[in-house]
Amino acid sequence: MVLKMIFDLIGGLGIFLFGMKNMSEGLQAVAGTRLRKMISVVTDNRLLAVGVGLFITCVVQSSSVTTVMVVGLVNSGFMTLMQAIGVIFGANIGTTITGWILTLKIGKYGLPMLGVAAFFFLFSKNERVRYTGMVFMGIGMIFFGLELMSGGLKPIRSIPEFAHWFARFQADSYFGVLKCALVGCLLTMIVQSSSATLGITMGLAKTGVIGFETAAALVLGENIGTTITAYLASLGASTNAKRAAYSHAVFNILGVAWITAIFPIYIGVIRKVVGHDPGVMVLAEGVETFPYILAGIALVHTGFNVTNTILFIPLLRPLAWLVTKIAPDKGTKETPHLTYLDIRMLDTPNFGLAQSKKELVFMGESIQLMMDKLREVLQQEKPNEELKRKIFHREDILDNVQKEITVFLGQLMSGRVTHSSIEEARIQLRAADELESISDYITNVMKMYLKLRKNKLEISEEGLKEILNLHDAVRDYLDMVIASIKEPPTDIVSRAHSRGDDVTRLMKEYRRHHLSRLAEEKIPPLKSLIYMDMLNAYRRIRDHGLNVAEALGGEK
């Protein structure tokens, strides 16, 4: 009997967790790009940030996933600390929806729901229908897993050893409440899913193994335990990302501290709201049942997070100040790094795409900076060493960023993502490759110019003027393309072709001028060759800019 109980518990927990994962992935796929738009509207408006956090967590069905994602966004500079704290507050409320889902009296329908939904997921060719089926397949798994766990836990009451062990954990005193909360905290830290430990708690309470007060105390501790995931994600991240993770922990720890101090009063309020004593056992067809205990536990969870959010919203700035003191600024300047996203964004691919897009914007802005510095070098008789170093350094940075984008998007596409997300990831991969190539040609132009200087050769005044004019034309062209990375206009491809043709005509005109000068005067072959190579390099920059525009416009 003990062995069967263990098997049912482990199997039920595994199916429950897999169901949560399927429901989360299905909801994210159905929600699509709306999730990305949600994060872009987050401002320092506290209520708006809380609302966004609540909605996102309801979709991804995990406050841990939301807070880990927020840590990643703060780490890369996509979100400020104040915005992140507001989203985390909302995430804590959003995660309570799991408890209410588990209160639905459809446990016995979990398996048939799983079976029917699986047919839609496996055999439908419509992507939206498939992922909607995946959502219901996940819900079916959740309830089937909960039923297995509940069935496996039922015999515990009849086994004296287990009953005696569980009797040690009774929330009948202040220290008893703290002890139960500590157990809930440690269990959630181990499982790293408050939804899973909430499911176990509800299973134990539903079968009468533990009382309502004990279950409530366990739920309070689970709120602290769930903060471990964000903390682990912040290891090795920027100081601001650590602060975001710490704010999650501080929020939950302080909340649990004051709720446990008035625990009997809090439980009394819950009983009044439920309208019945959740711990009362009722015989139904000769079977012991606790008809109100699941609703009571769900209300404990929701009440804790809603009340704490209401209390802490006015204290958002003091909380930000506190975590700033806990994690003070480092002495050296920190630079956001894309590889930090690898473990933070793969569970939320839509946000991962938004983050990699931000890195494309960074690449574009870096190219604009390189073009400006290159123009300065071209105008100097003796090229400034610091300017040269900065251009080469920026090109190295873009090499690394392009590699990181490739690795990150490759991992993202290997997961379960929609066709539209895969297509956008491919567009971003192509754009990153083209932008990196532009940076290579910018450094090539500088290398050619430095080679002229090294051989004590100078471009004529007329030739230099033409180079600078071509440089400015290409710079303007790149400005148009790079501005389109954030939100590509519908006519980006036609505009890129039209303005690109102007650049090509200008380059050909200057090439004819050079050939005319070559016929009129004796020009050293090396000087002539380098000048022509510089013109061609600018044309290649234009070509790669056009490729970026075509990628953004959806052309193959």
Image (spheres, rainbow, N blue to C red):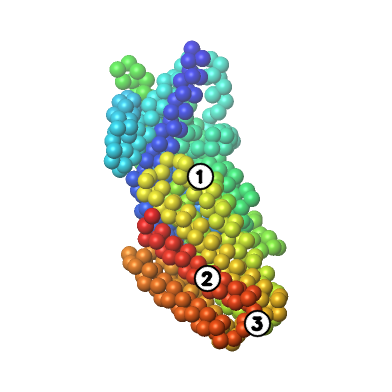
- Residue bearing mark 3: 458
Task: Point out the tag, 1 or 3, that comes first from the N-terminus.
Answer: 1
On screen, residue 106 above or below 401: above
Q: Decide which of 155, 547 is in the foreground and name it.
A: 547
Disc 3 crowd rating (10 Å Cα; few below 14, some 14-19, many 20+) is some
Task: Point out the tag, 1 or 2, that comes first from the N-terminus.
Answer: 1
Residue 165 appears anywhere in the view: yes
Q: Decide which of 541, 96 is in the foreground and name it.
A: 541
Q: Amino acid at mark 1?
A: Gln
Q: Decide which of 227, 395 is in the foreground and name it.
A: 395
Question: Residue 360 location, x and y as percent?
Answer: 49, 60
- Residue bearing mark 2: 536
Question: Residue 118 location, x and y as percent?
Answer: 33, 30
Say which residue appears at 51% left-offset and 62% top-offset.
Answer: 435
On screen, residue 427 above or below 522: above
Which quadrant of the rendered structure holds the C terminus? Answer: bottom left
On screen, residue 387 above or below 256: below
On screen, residue 70 above or below 223: below
Say which residue appears at 54% left-offset and 19% top-offset.
Answer: 162
Front of the two marks 1 and 3: 3
Label pair 1/2, CB-CB below 8 angstroms: no
* Residue 411's disc number: 1
Q: CA distance from mark 2 to mark 3?
A: 18 Å
Q: Amino acid at mark 3?
A: Glu
Farthest-out residue, top: 1
Q: Secondary structure at mark 2?
A: helix
Say which residue appears at 47% left-offset and 51% top-offset.
Answer: 352
Task: Point out the tag, 2 or 3, that comes first from the N-terminus.
Answer: 3
Q: Secondary structure at mark 3?
A: loop
